[in-house]
Image (tube, rainbow, N blue to C red):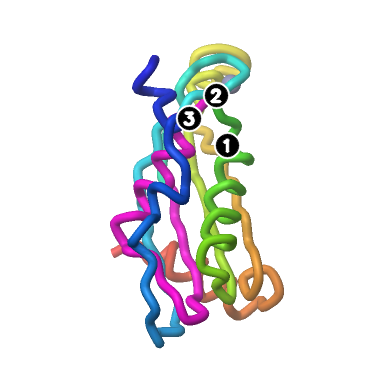
Amino acid sequence: MRYLTSGYKKDADQLLNGAMFDVAYDEMVIVKDIEVFSLCEHHMLPFFGKCHVAYIPNGKVIGLSKIPRLVDMYARRLQVQERLTTQIAETINAKISPKGVAVVIEAKHLCMIMRGVEKQNSTAVTSSMLGDFKDNQNTRNEFLNLLHNRS
Ligand SMILES: [Zn+2]
């Protein structure tokens, strides 16, 4: 349990310290299929799945390996999927002020599978879209198309 909640002992400043770089690149950066394991705060049961993160830099990028670590930091806490999604997006937004950020999480919840509605194959999908991803339909579609082209 201590490990599963070890994200409380970390903070984004410490995690991203020294891993933000000035770069002229201004196309979409996507890190997809990041494995997520978290615990639902209502039932203390796991939920797990994939997280996809995209942003459009505005002069700064985050070291690519730090994005899964940021996801882990927030996932290793008692969570609700909606909040987890928003926290990842808002942290990236605050740290590098990109033109836009998008986070999508697709997860299965043991609290839905083992109890309650007992639906074995349902997946909960949450998203947080900020900046260009919120305001520009083309940008959002480009991101969603890239996610669904699984080759
Ligand atoms: Zn639950």
On the image, the x and y values in percent for residue 115 come to: 56, 12
On the image, the x and y values in percent for residue 39 come to: 49, 24
Residue drawn at 34 percent across, 62 percent down: 19
Say whether residue 119 is visible: no
Can you identify the residue that label 3 sits on? 8
Does 24 lie within the magenta span? no
The label nearer to you, 3 versus 2, is 3
Residue drawn at 35 percent across, 50 percent down: 68
Can you identify the residue that label 1 sits on? 81
**Residue farthest to the right?**
135
The amino acid pointed to by label 2 is Cys
Q: Are marks 3 and 2 in contact (CB under 8 Å)?
A: no
On the image, the x and y values in percent for residue 113 come to: 50, 20
Q: Secondary structure at mark 1?
A: helix
- Magenta stretch: give its range: 51-77
Query: First in sequence: mark 1 or mark 3?
Result: 3
Image quarter of residue 6? top left
Q: Nearer the viewer, residue 130 or 60?
A: 60
Q: Is residue 129 above or below residue 107?
A: below
Query: First in sequence: mark 2 or mark 1?
Result: 2
Q: Is residue 105 left or right of residue 21?
A: right
Distance between mark 1 and mark 3 Cα atoms: 16 Å
Q: Indicate if the residue with disc 2 has its beta carbon within 8 Å of ligand 1.
A: yes
The amino acid pointed to by label 3 is Tyr
Q: Secondary structure at mark 3?
A: helix
